[in-house]
Image (cartoon, rainbow, N blue to C red):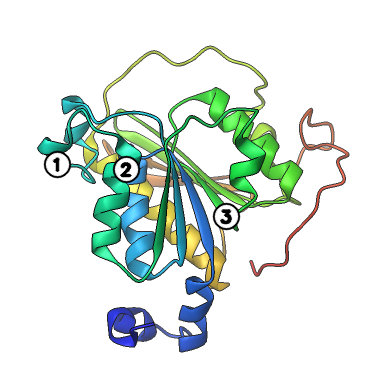
Amino acid sequence: MIVERYARNLGLPGWTVETQRRLATAGVLVVGAGGLGSAVLPYLVAAGVGRTGIVEDDTVEITNLQRQVLYDTPDVGTSKAEAAARRLSALNPEVTVTPHRTRLTPENAAGILAAYDLVIDCTDNLATRQLINRTCLELGKPWVHAAVSEYYGHVTTLRPAGPCWHCLSGMDTAAEPPPSGILGPVAGLIGCLQATEALKYLTGTGRLLVGRLLVWDALRPGWEEFSYRKNPDCAVCGNRNIPVPPAAD
């Protein structure tokens, strides 16, 4: 570990060389390398997370570049996962970046997620979020959820023993939302919050957004925070014997 690279981390109150080493041994899986992922991924890699996986089966399109700042115009038509991995490896060659050029499915989800300590949901569809929720519960994995649309975004962190995404959303199945616009900086802002939650979890720093949904409205502008609780009758996590990994709040 090159200490000089992480000097601004090490200058933080309570952040020691041991804290940095803890990051270096951690693994984070980012599902989706679009607008949210474009903010999450560089900050995780730059901070020194030892292993970062990227699940993404899409290719770069010209319309992505308005908000997906991880890519350049020459990347159009190429694999997002591989283009992201190349750029991130150049940003920090000390860490490992693994592209999983696939869509997360019920058949491969457990096998991919099992290799990582934390999952970050940077997807844009309900079916994948439901799959992440169920798989993380089965494996006892924490995950950070976020969503953005137009001028709005929200973020929360989910732990195996706490309320799950279904407790928050109340949805088993739902129609996909219609395509809509998104102000690029909103995706960047919410993605940065996801990265912050991830680094806090991995280092045991601060209080996580567990049972709390933080919502940003760029038009007002302003933040709102909503609390939510575990539903004992939840169809997904209610009355489950869930494995819980040791971690600080």
Identify the mark nearer the N-term, 2 or 1: 1
**Image point 32% across, 66% down: which residue?**
46
Q: In the image, is residue 11 above or below residue 129?
A: below
Query: Which image quadrant for residue 77?
Result: top left
> Which three-letter amino acid code belongs to the residue tagged 1?
Asp
The residue labelled by disc 2 is 82
Looking at the rendered image, the quarter that the N terminus falls into is bottom left
Where disc 1 sits, the SS reads loop
The residue labelled by disc 3 is 118
**Image point 37% across, 69% down: which residue?**
47
**Image point 37% across, 46% down: which residue?**
190
| Location of residue 84 in the rendering, given as x and y in whole percent from the top left corner | 29, 46
| Nearer the camera: disc 3 or disc 1 | 1
> Which three-letter amino acid code belongs to the residue tagged 2?
Glu
The residue labelled by disc 1 is 72
Q: How many marks?
A: 3
Q: In the image, is residue 223 above or below residue 178?
A: below
Q: In the image, is residue 176 above or below residue 55?
A: above
**Image point 29% across, 32% down: which residue?**
151
Where disc 3 sits, the SS reads strand
| Location of residue 11 in the rendering, given as x and y in whole percent from the top left corner | 35, 86
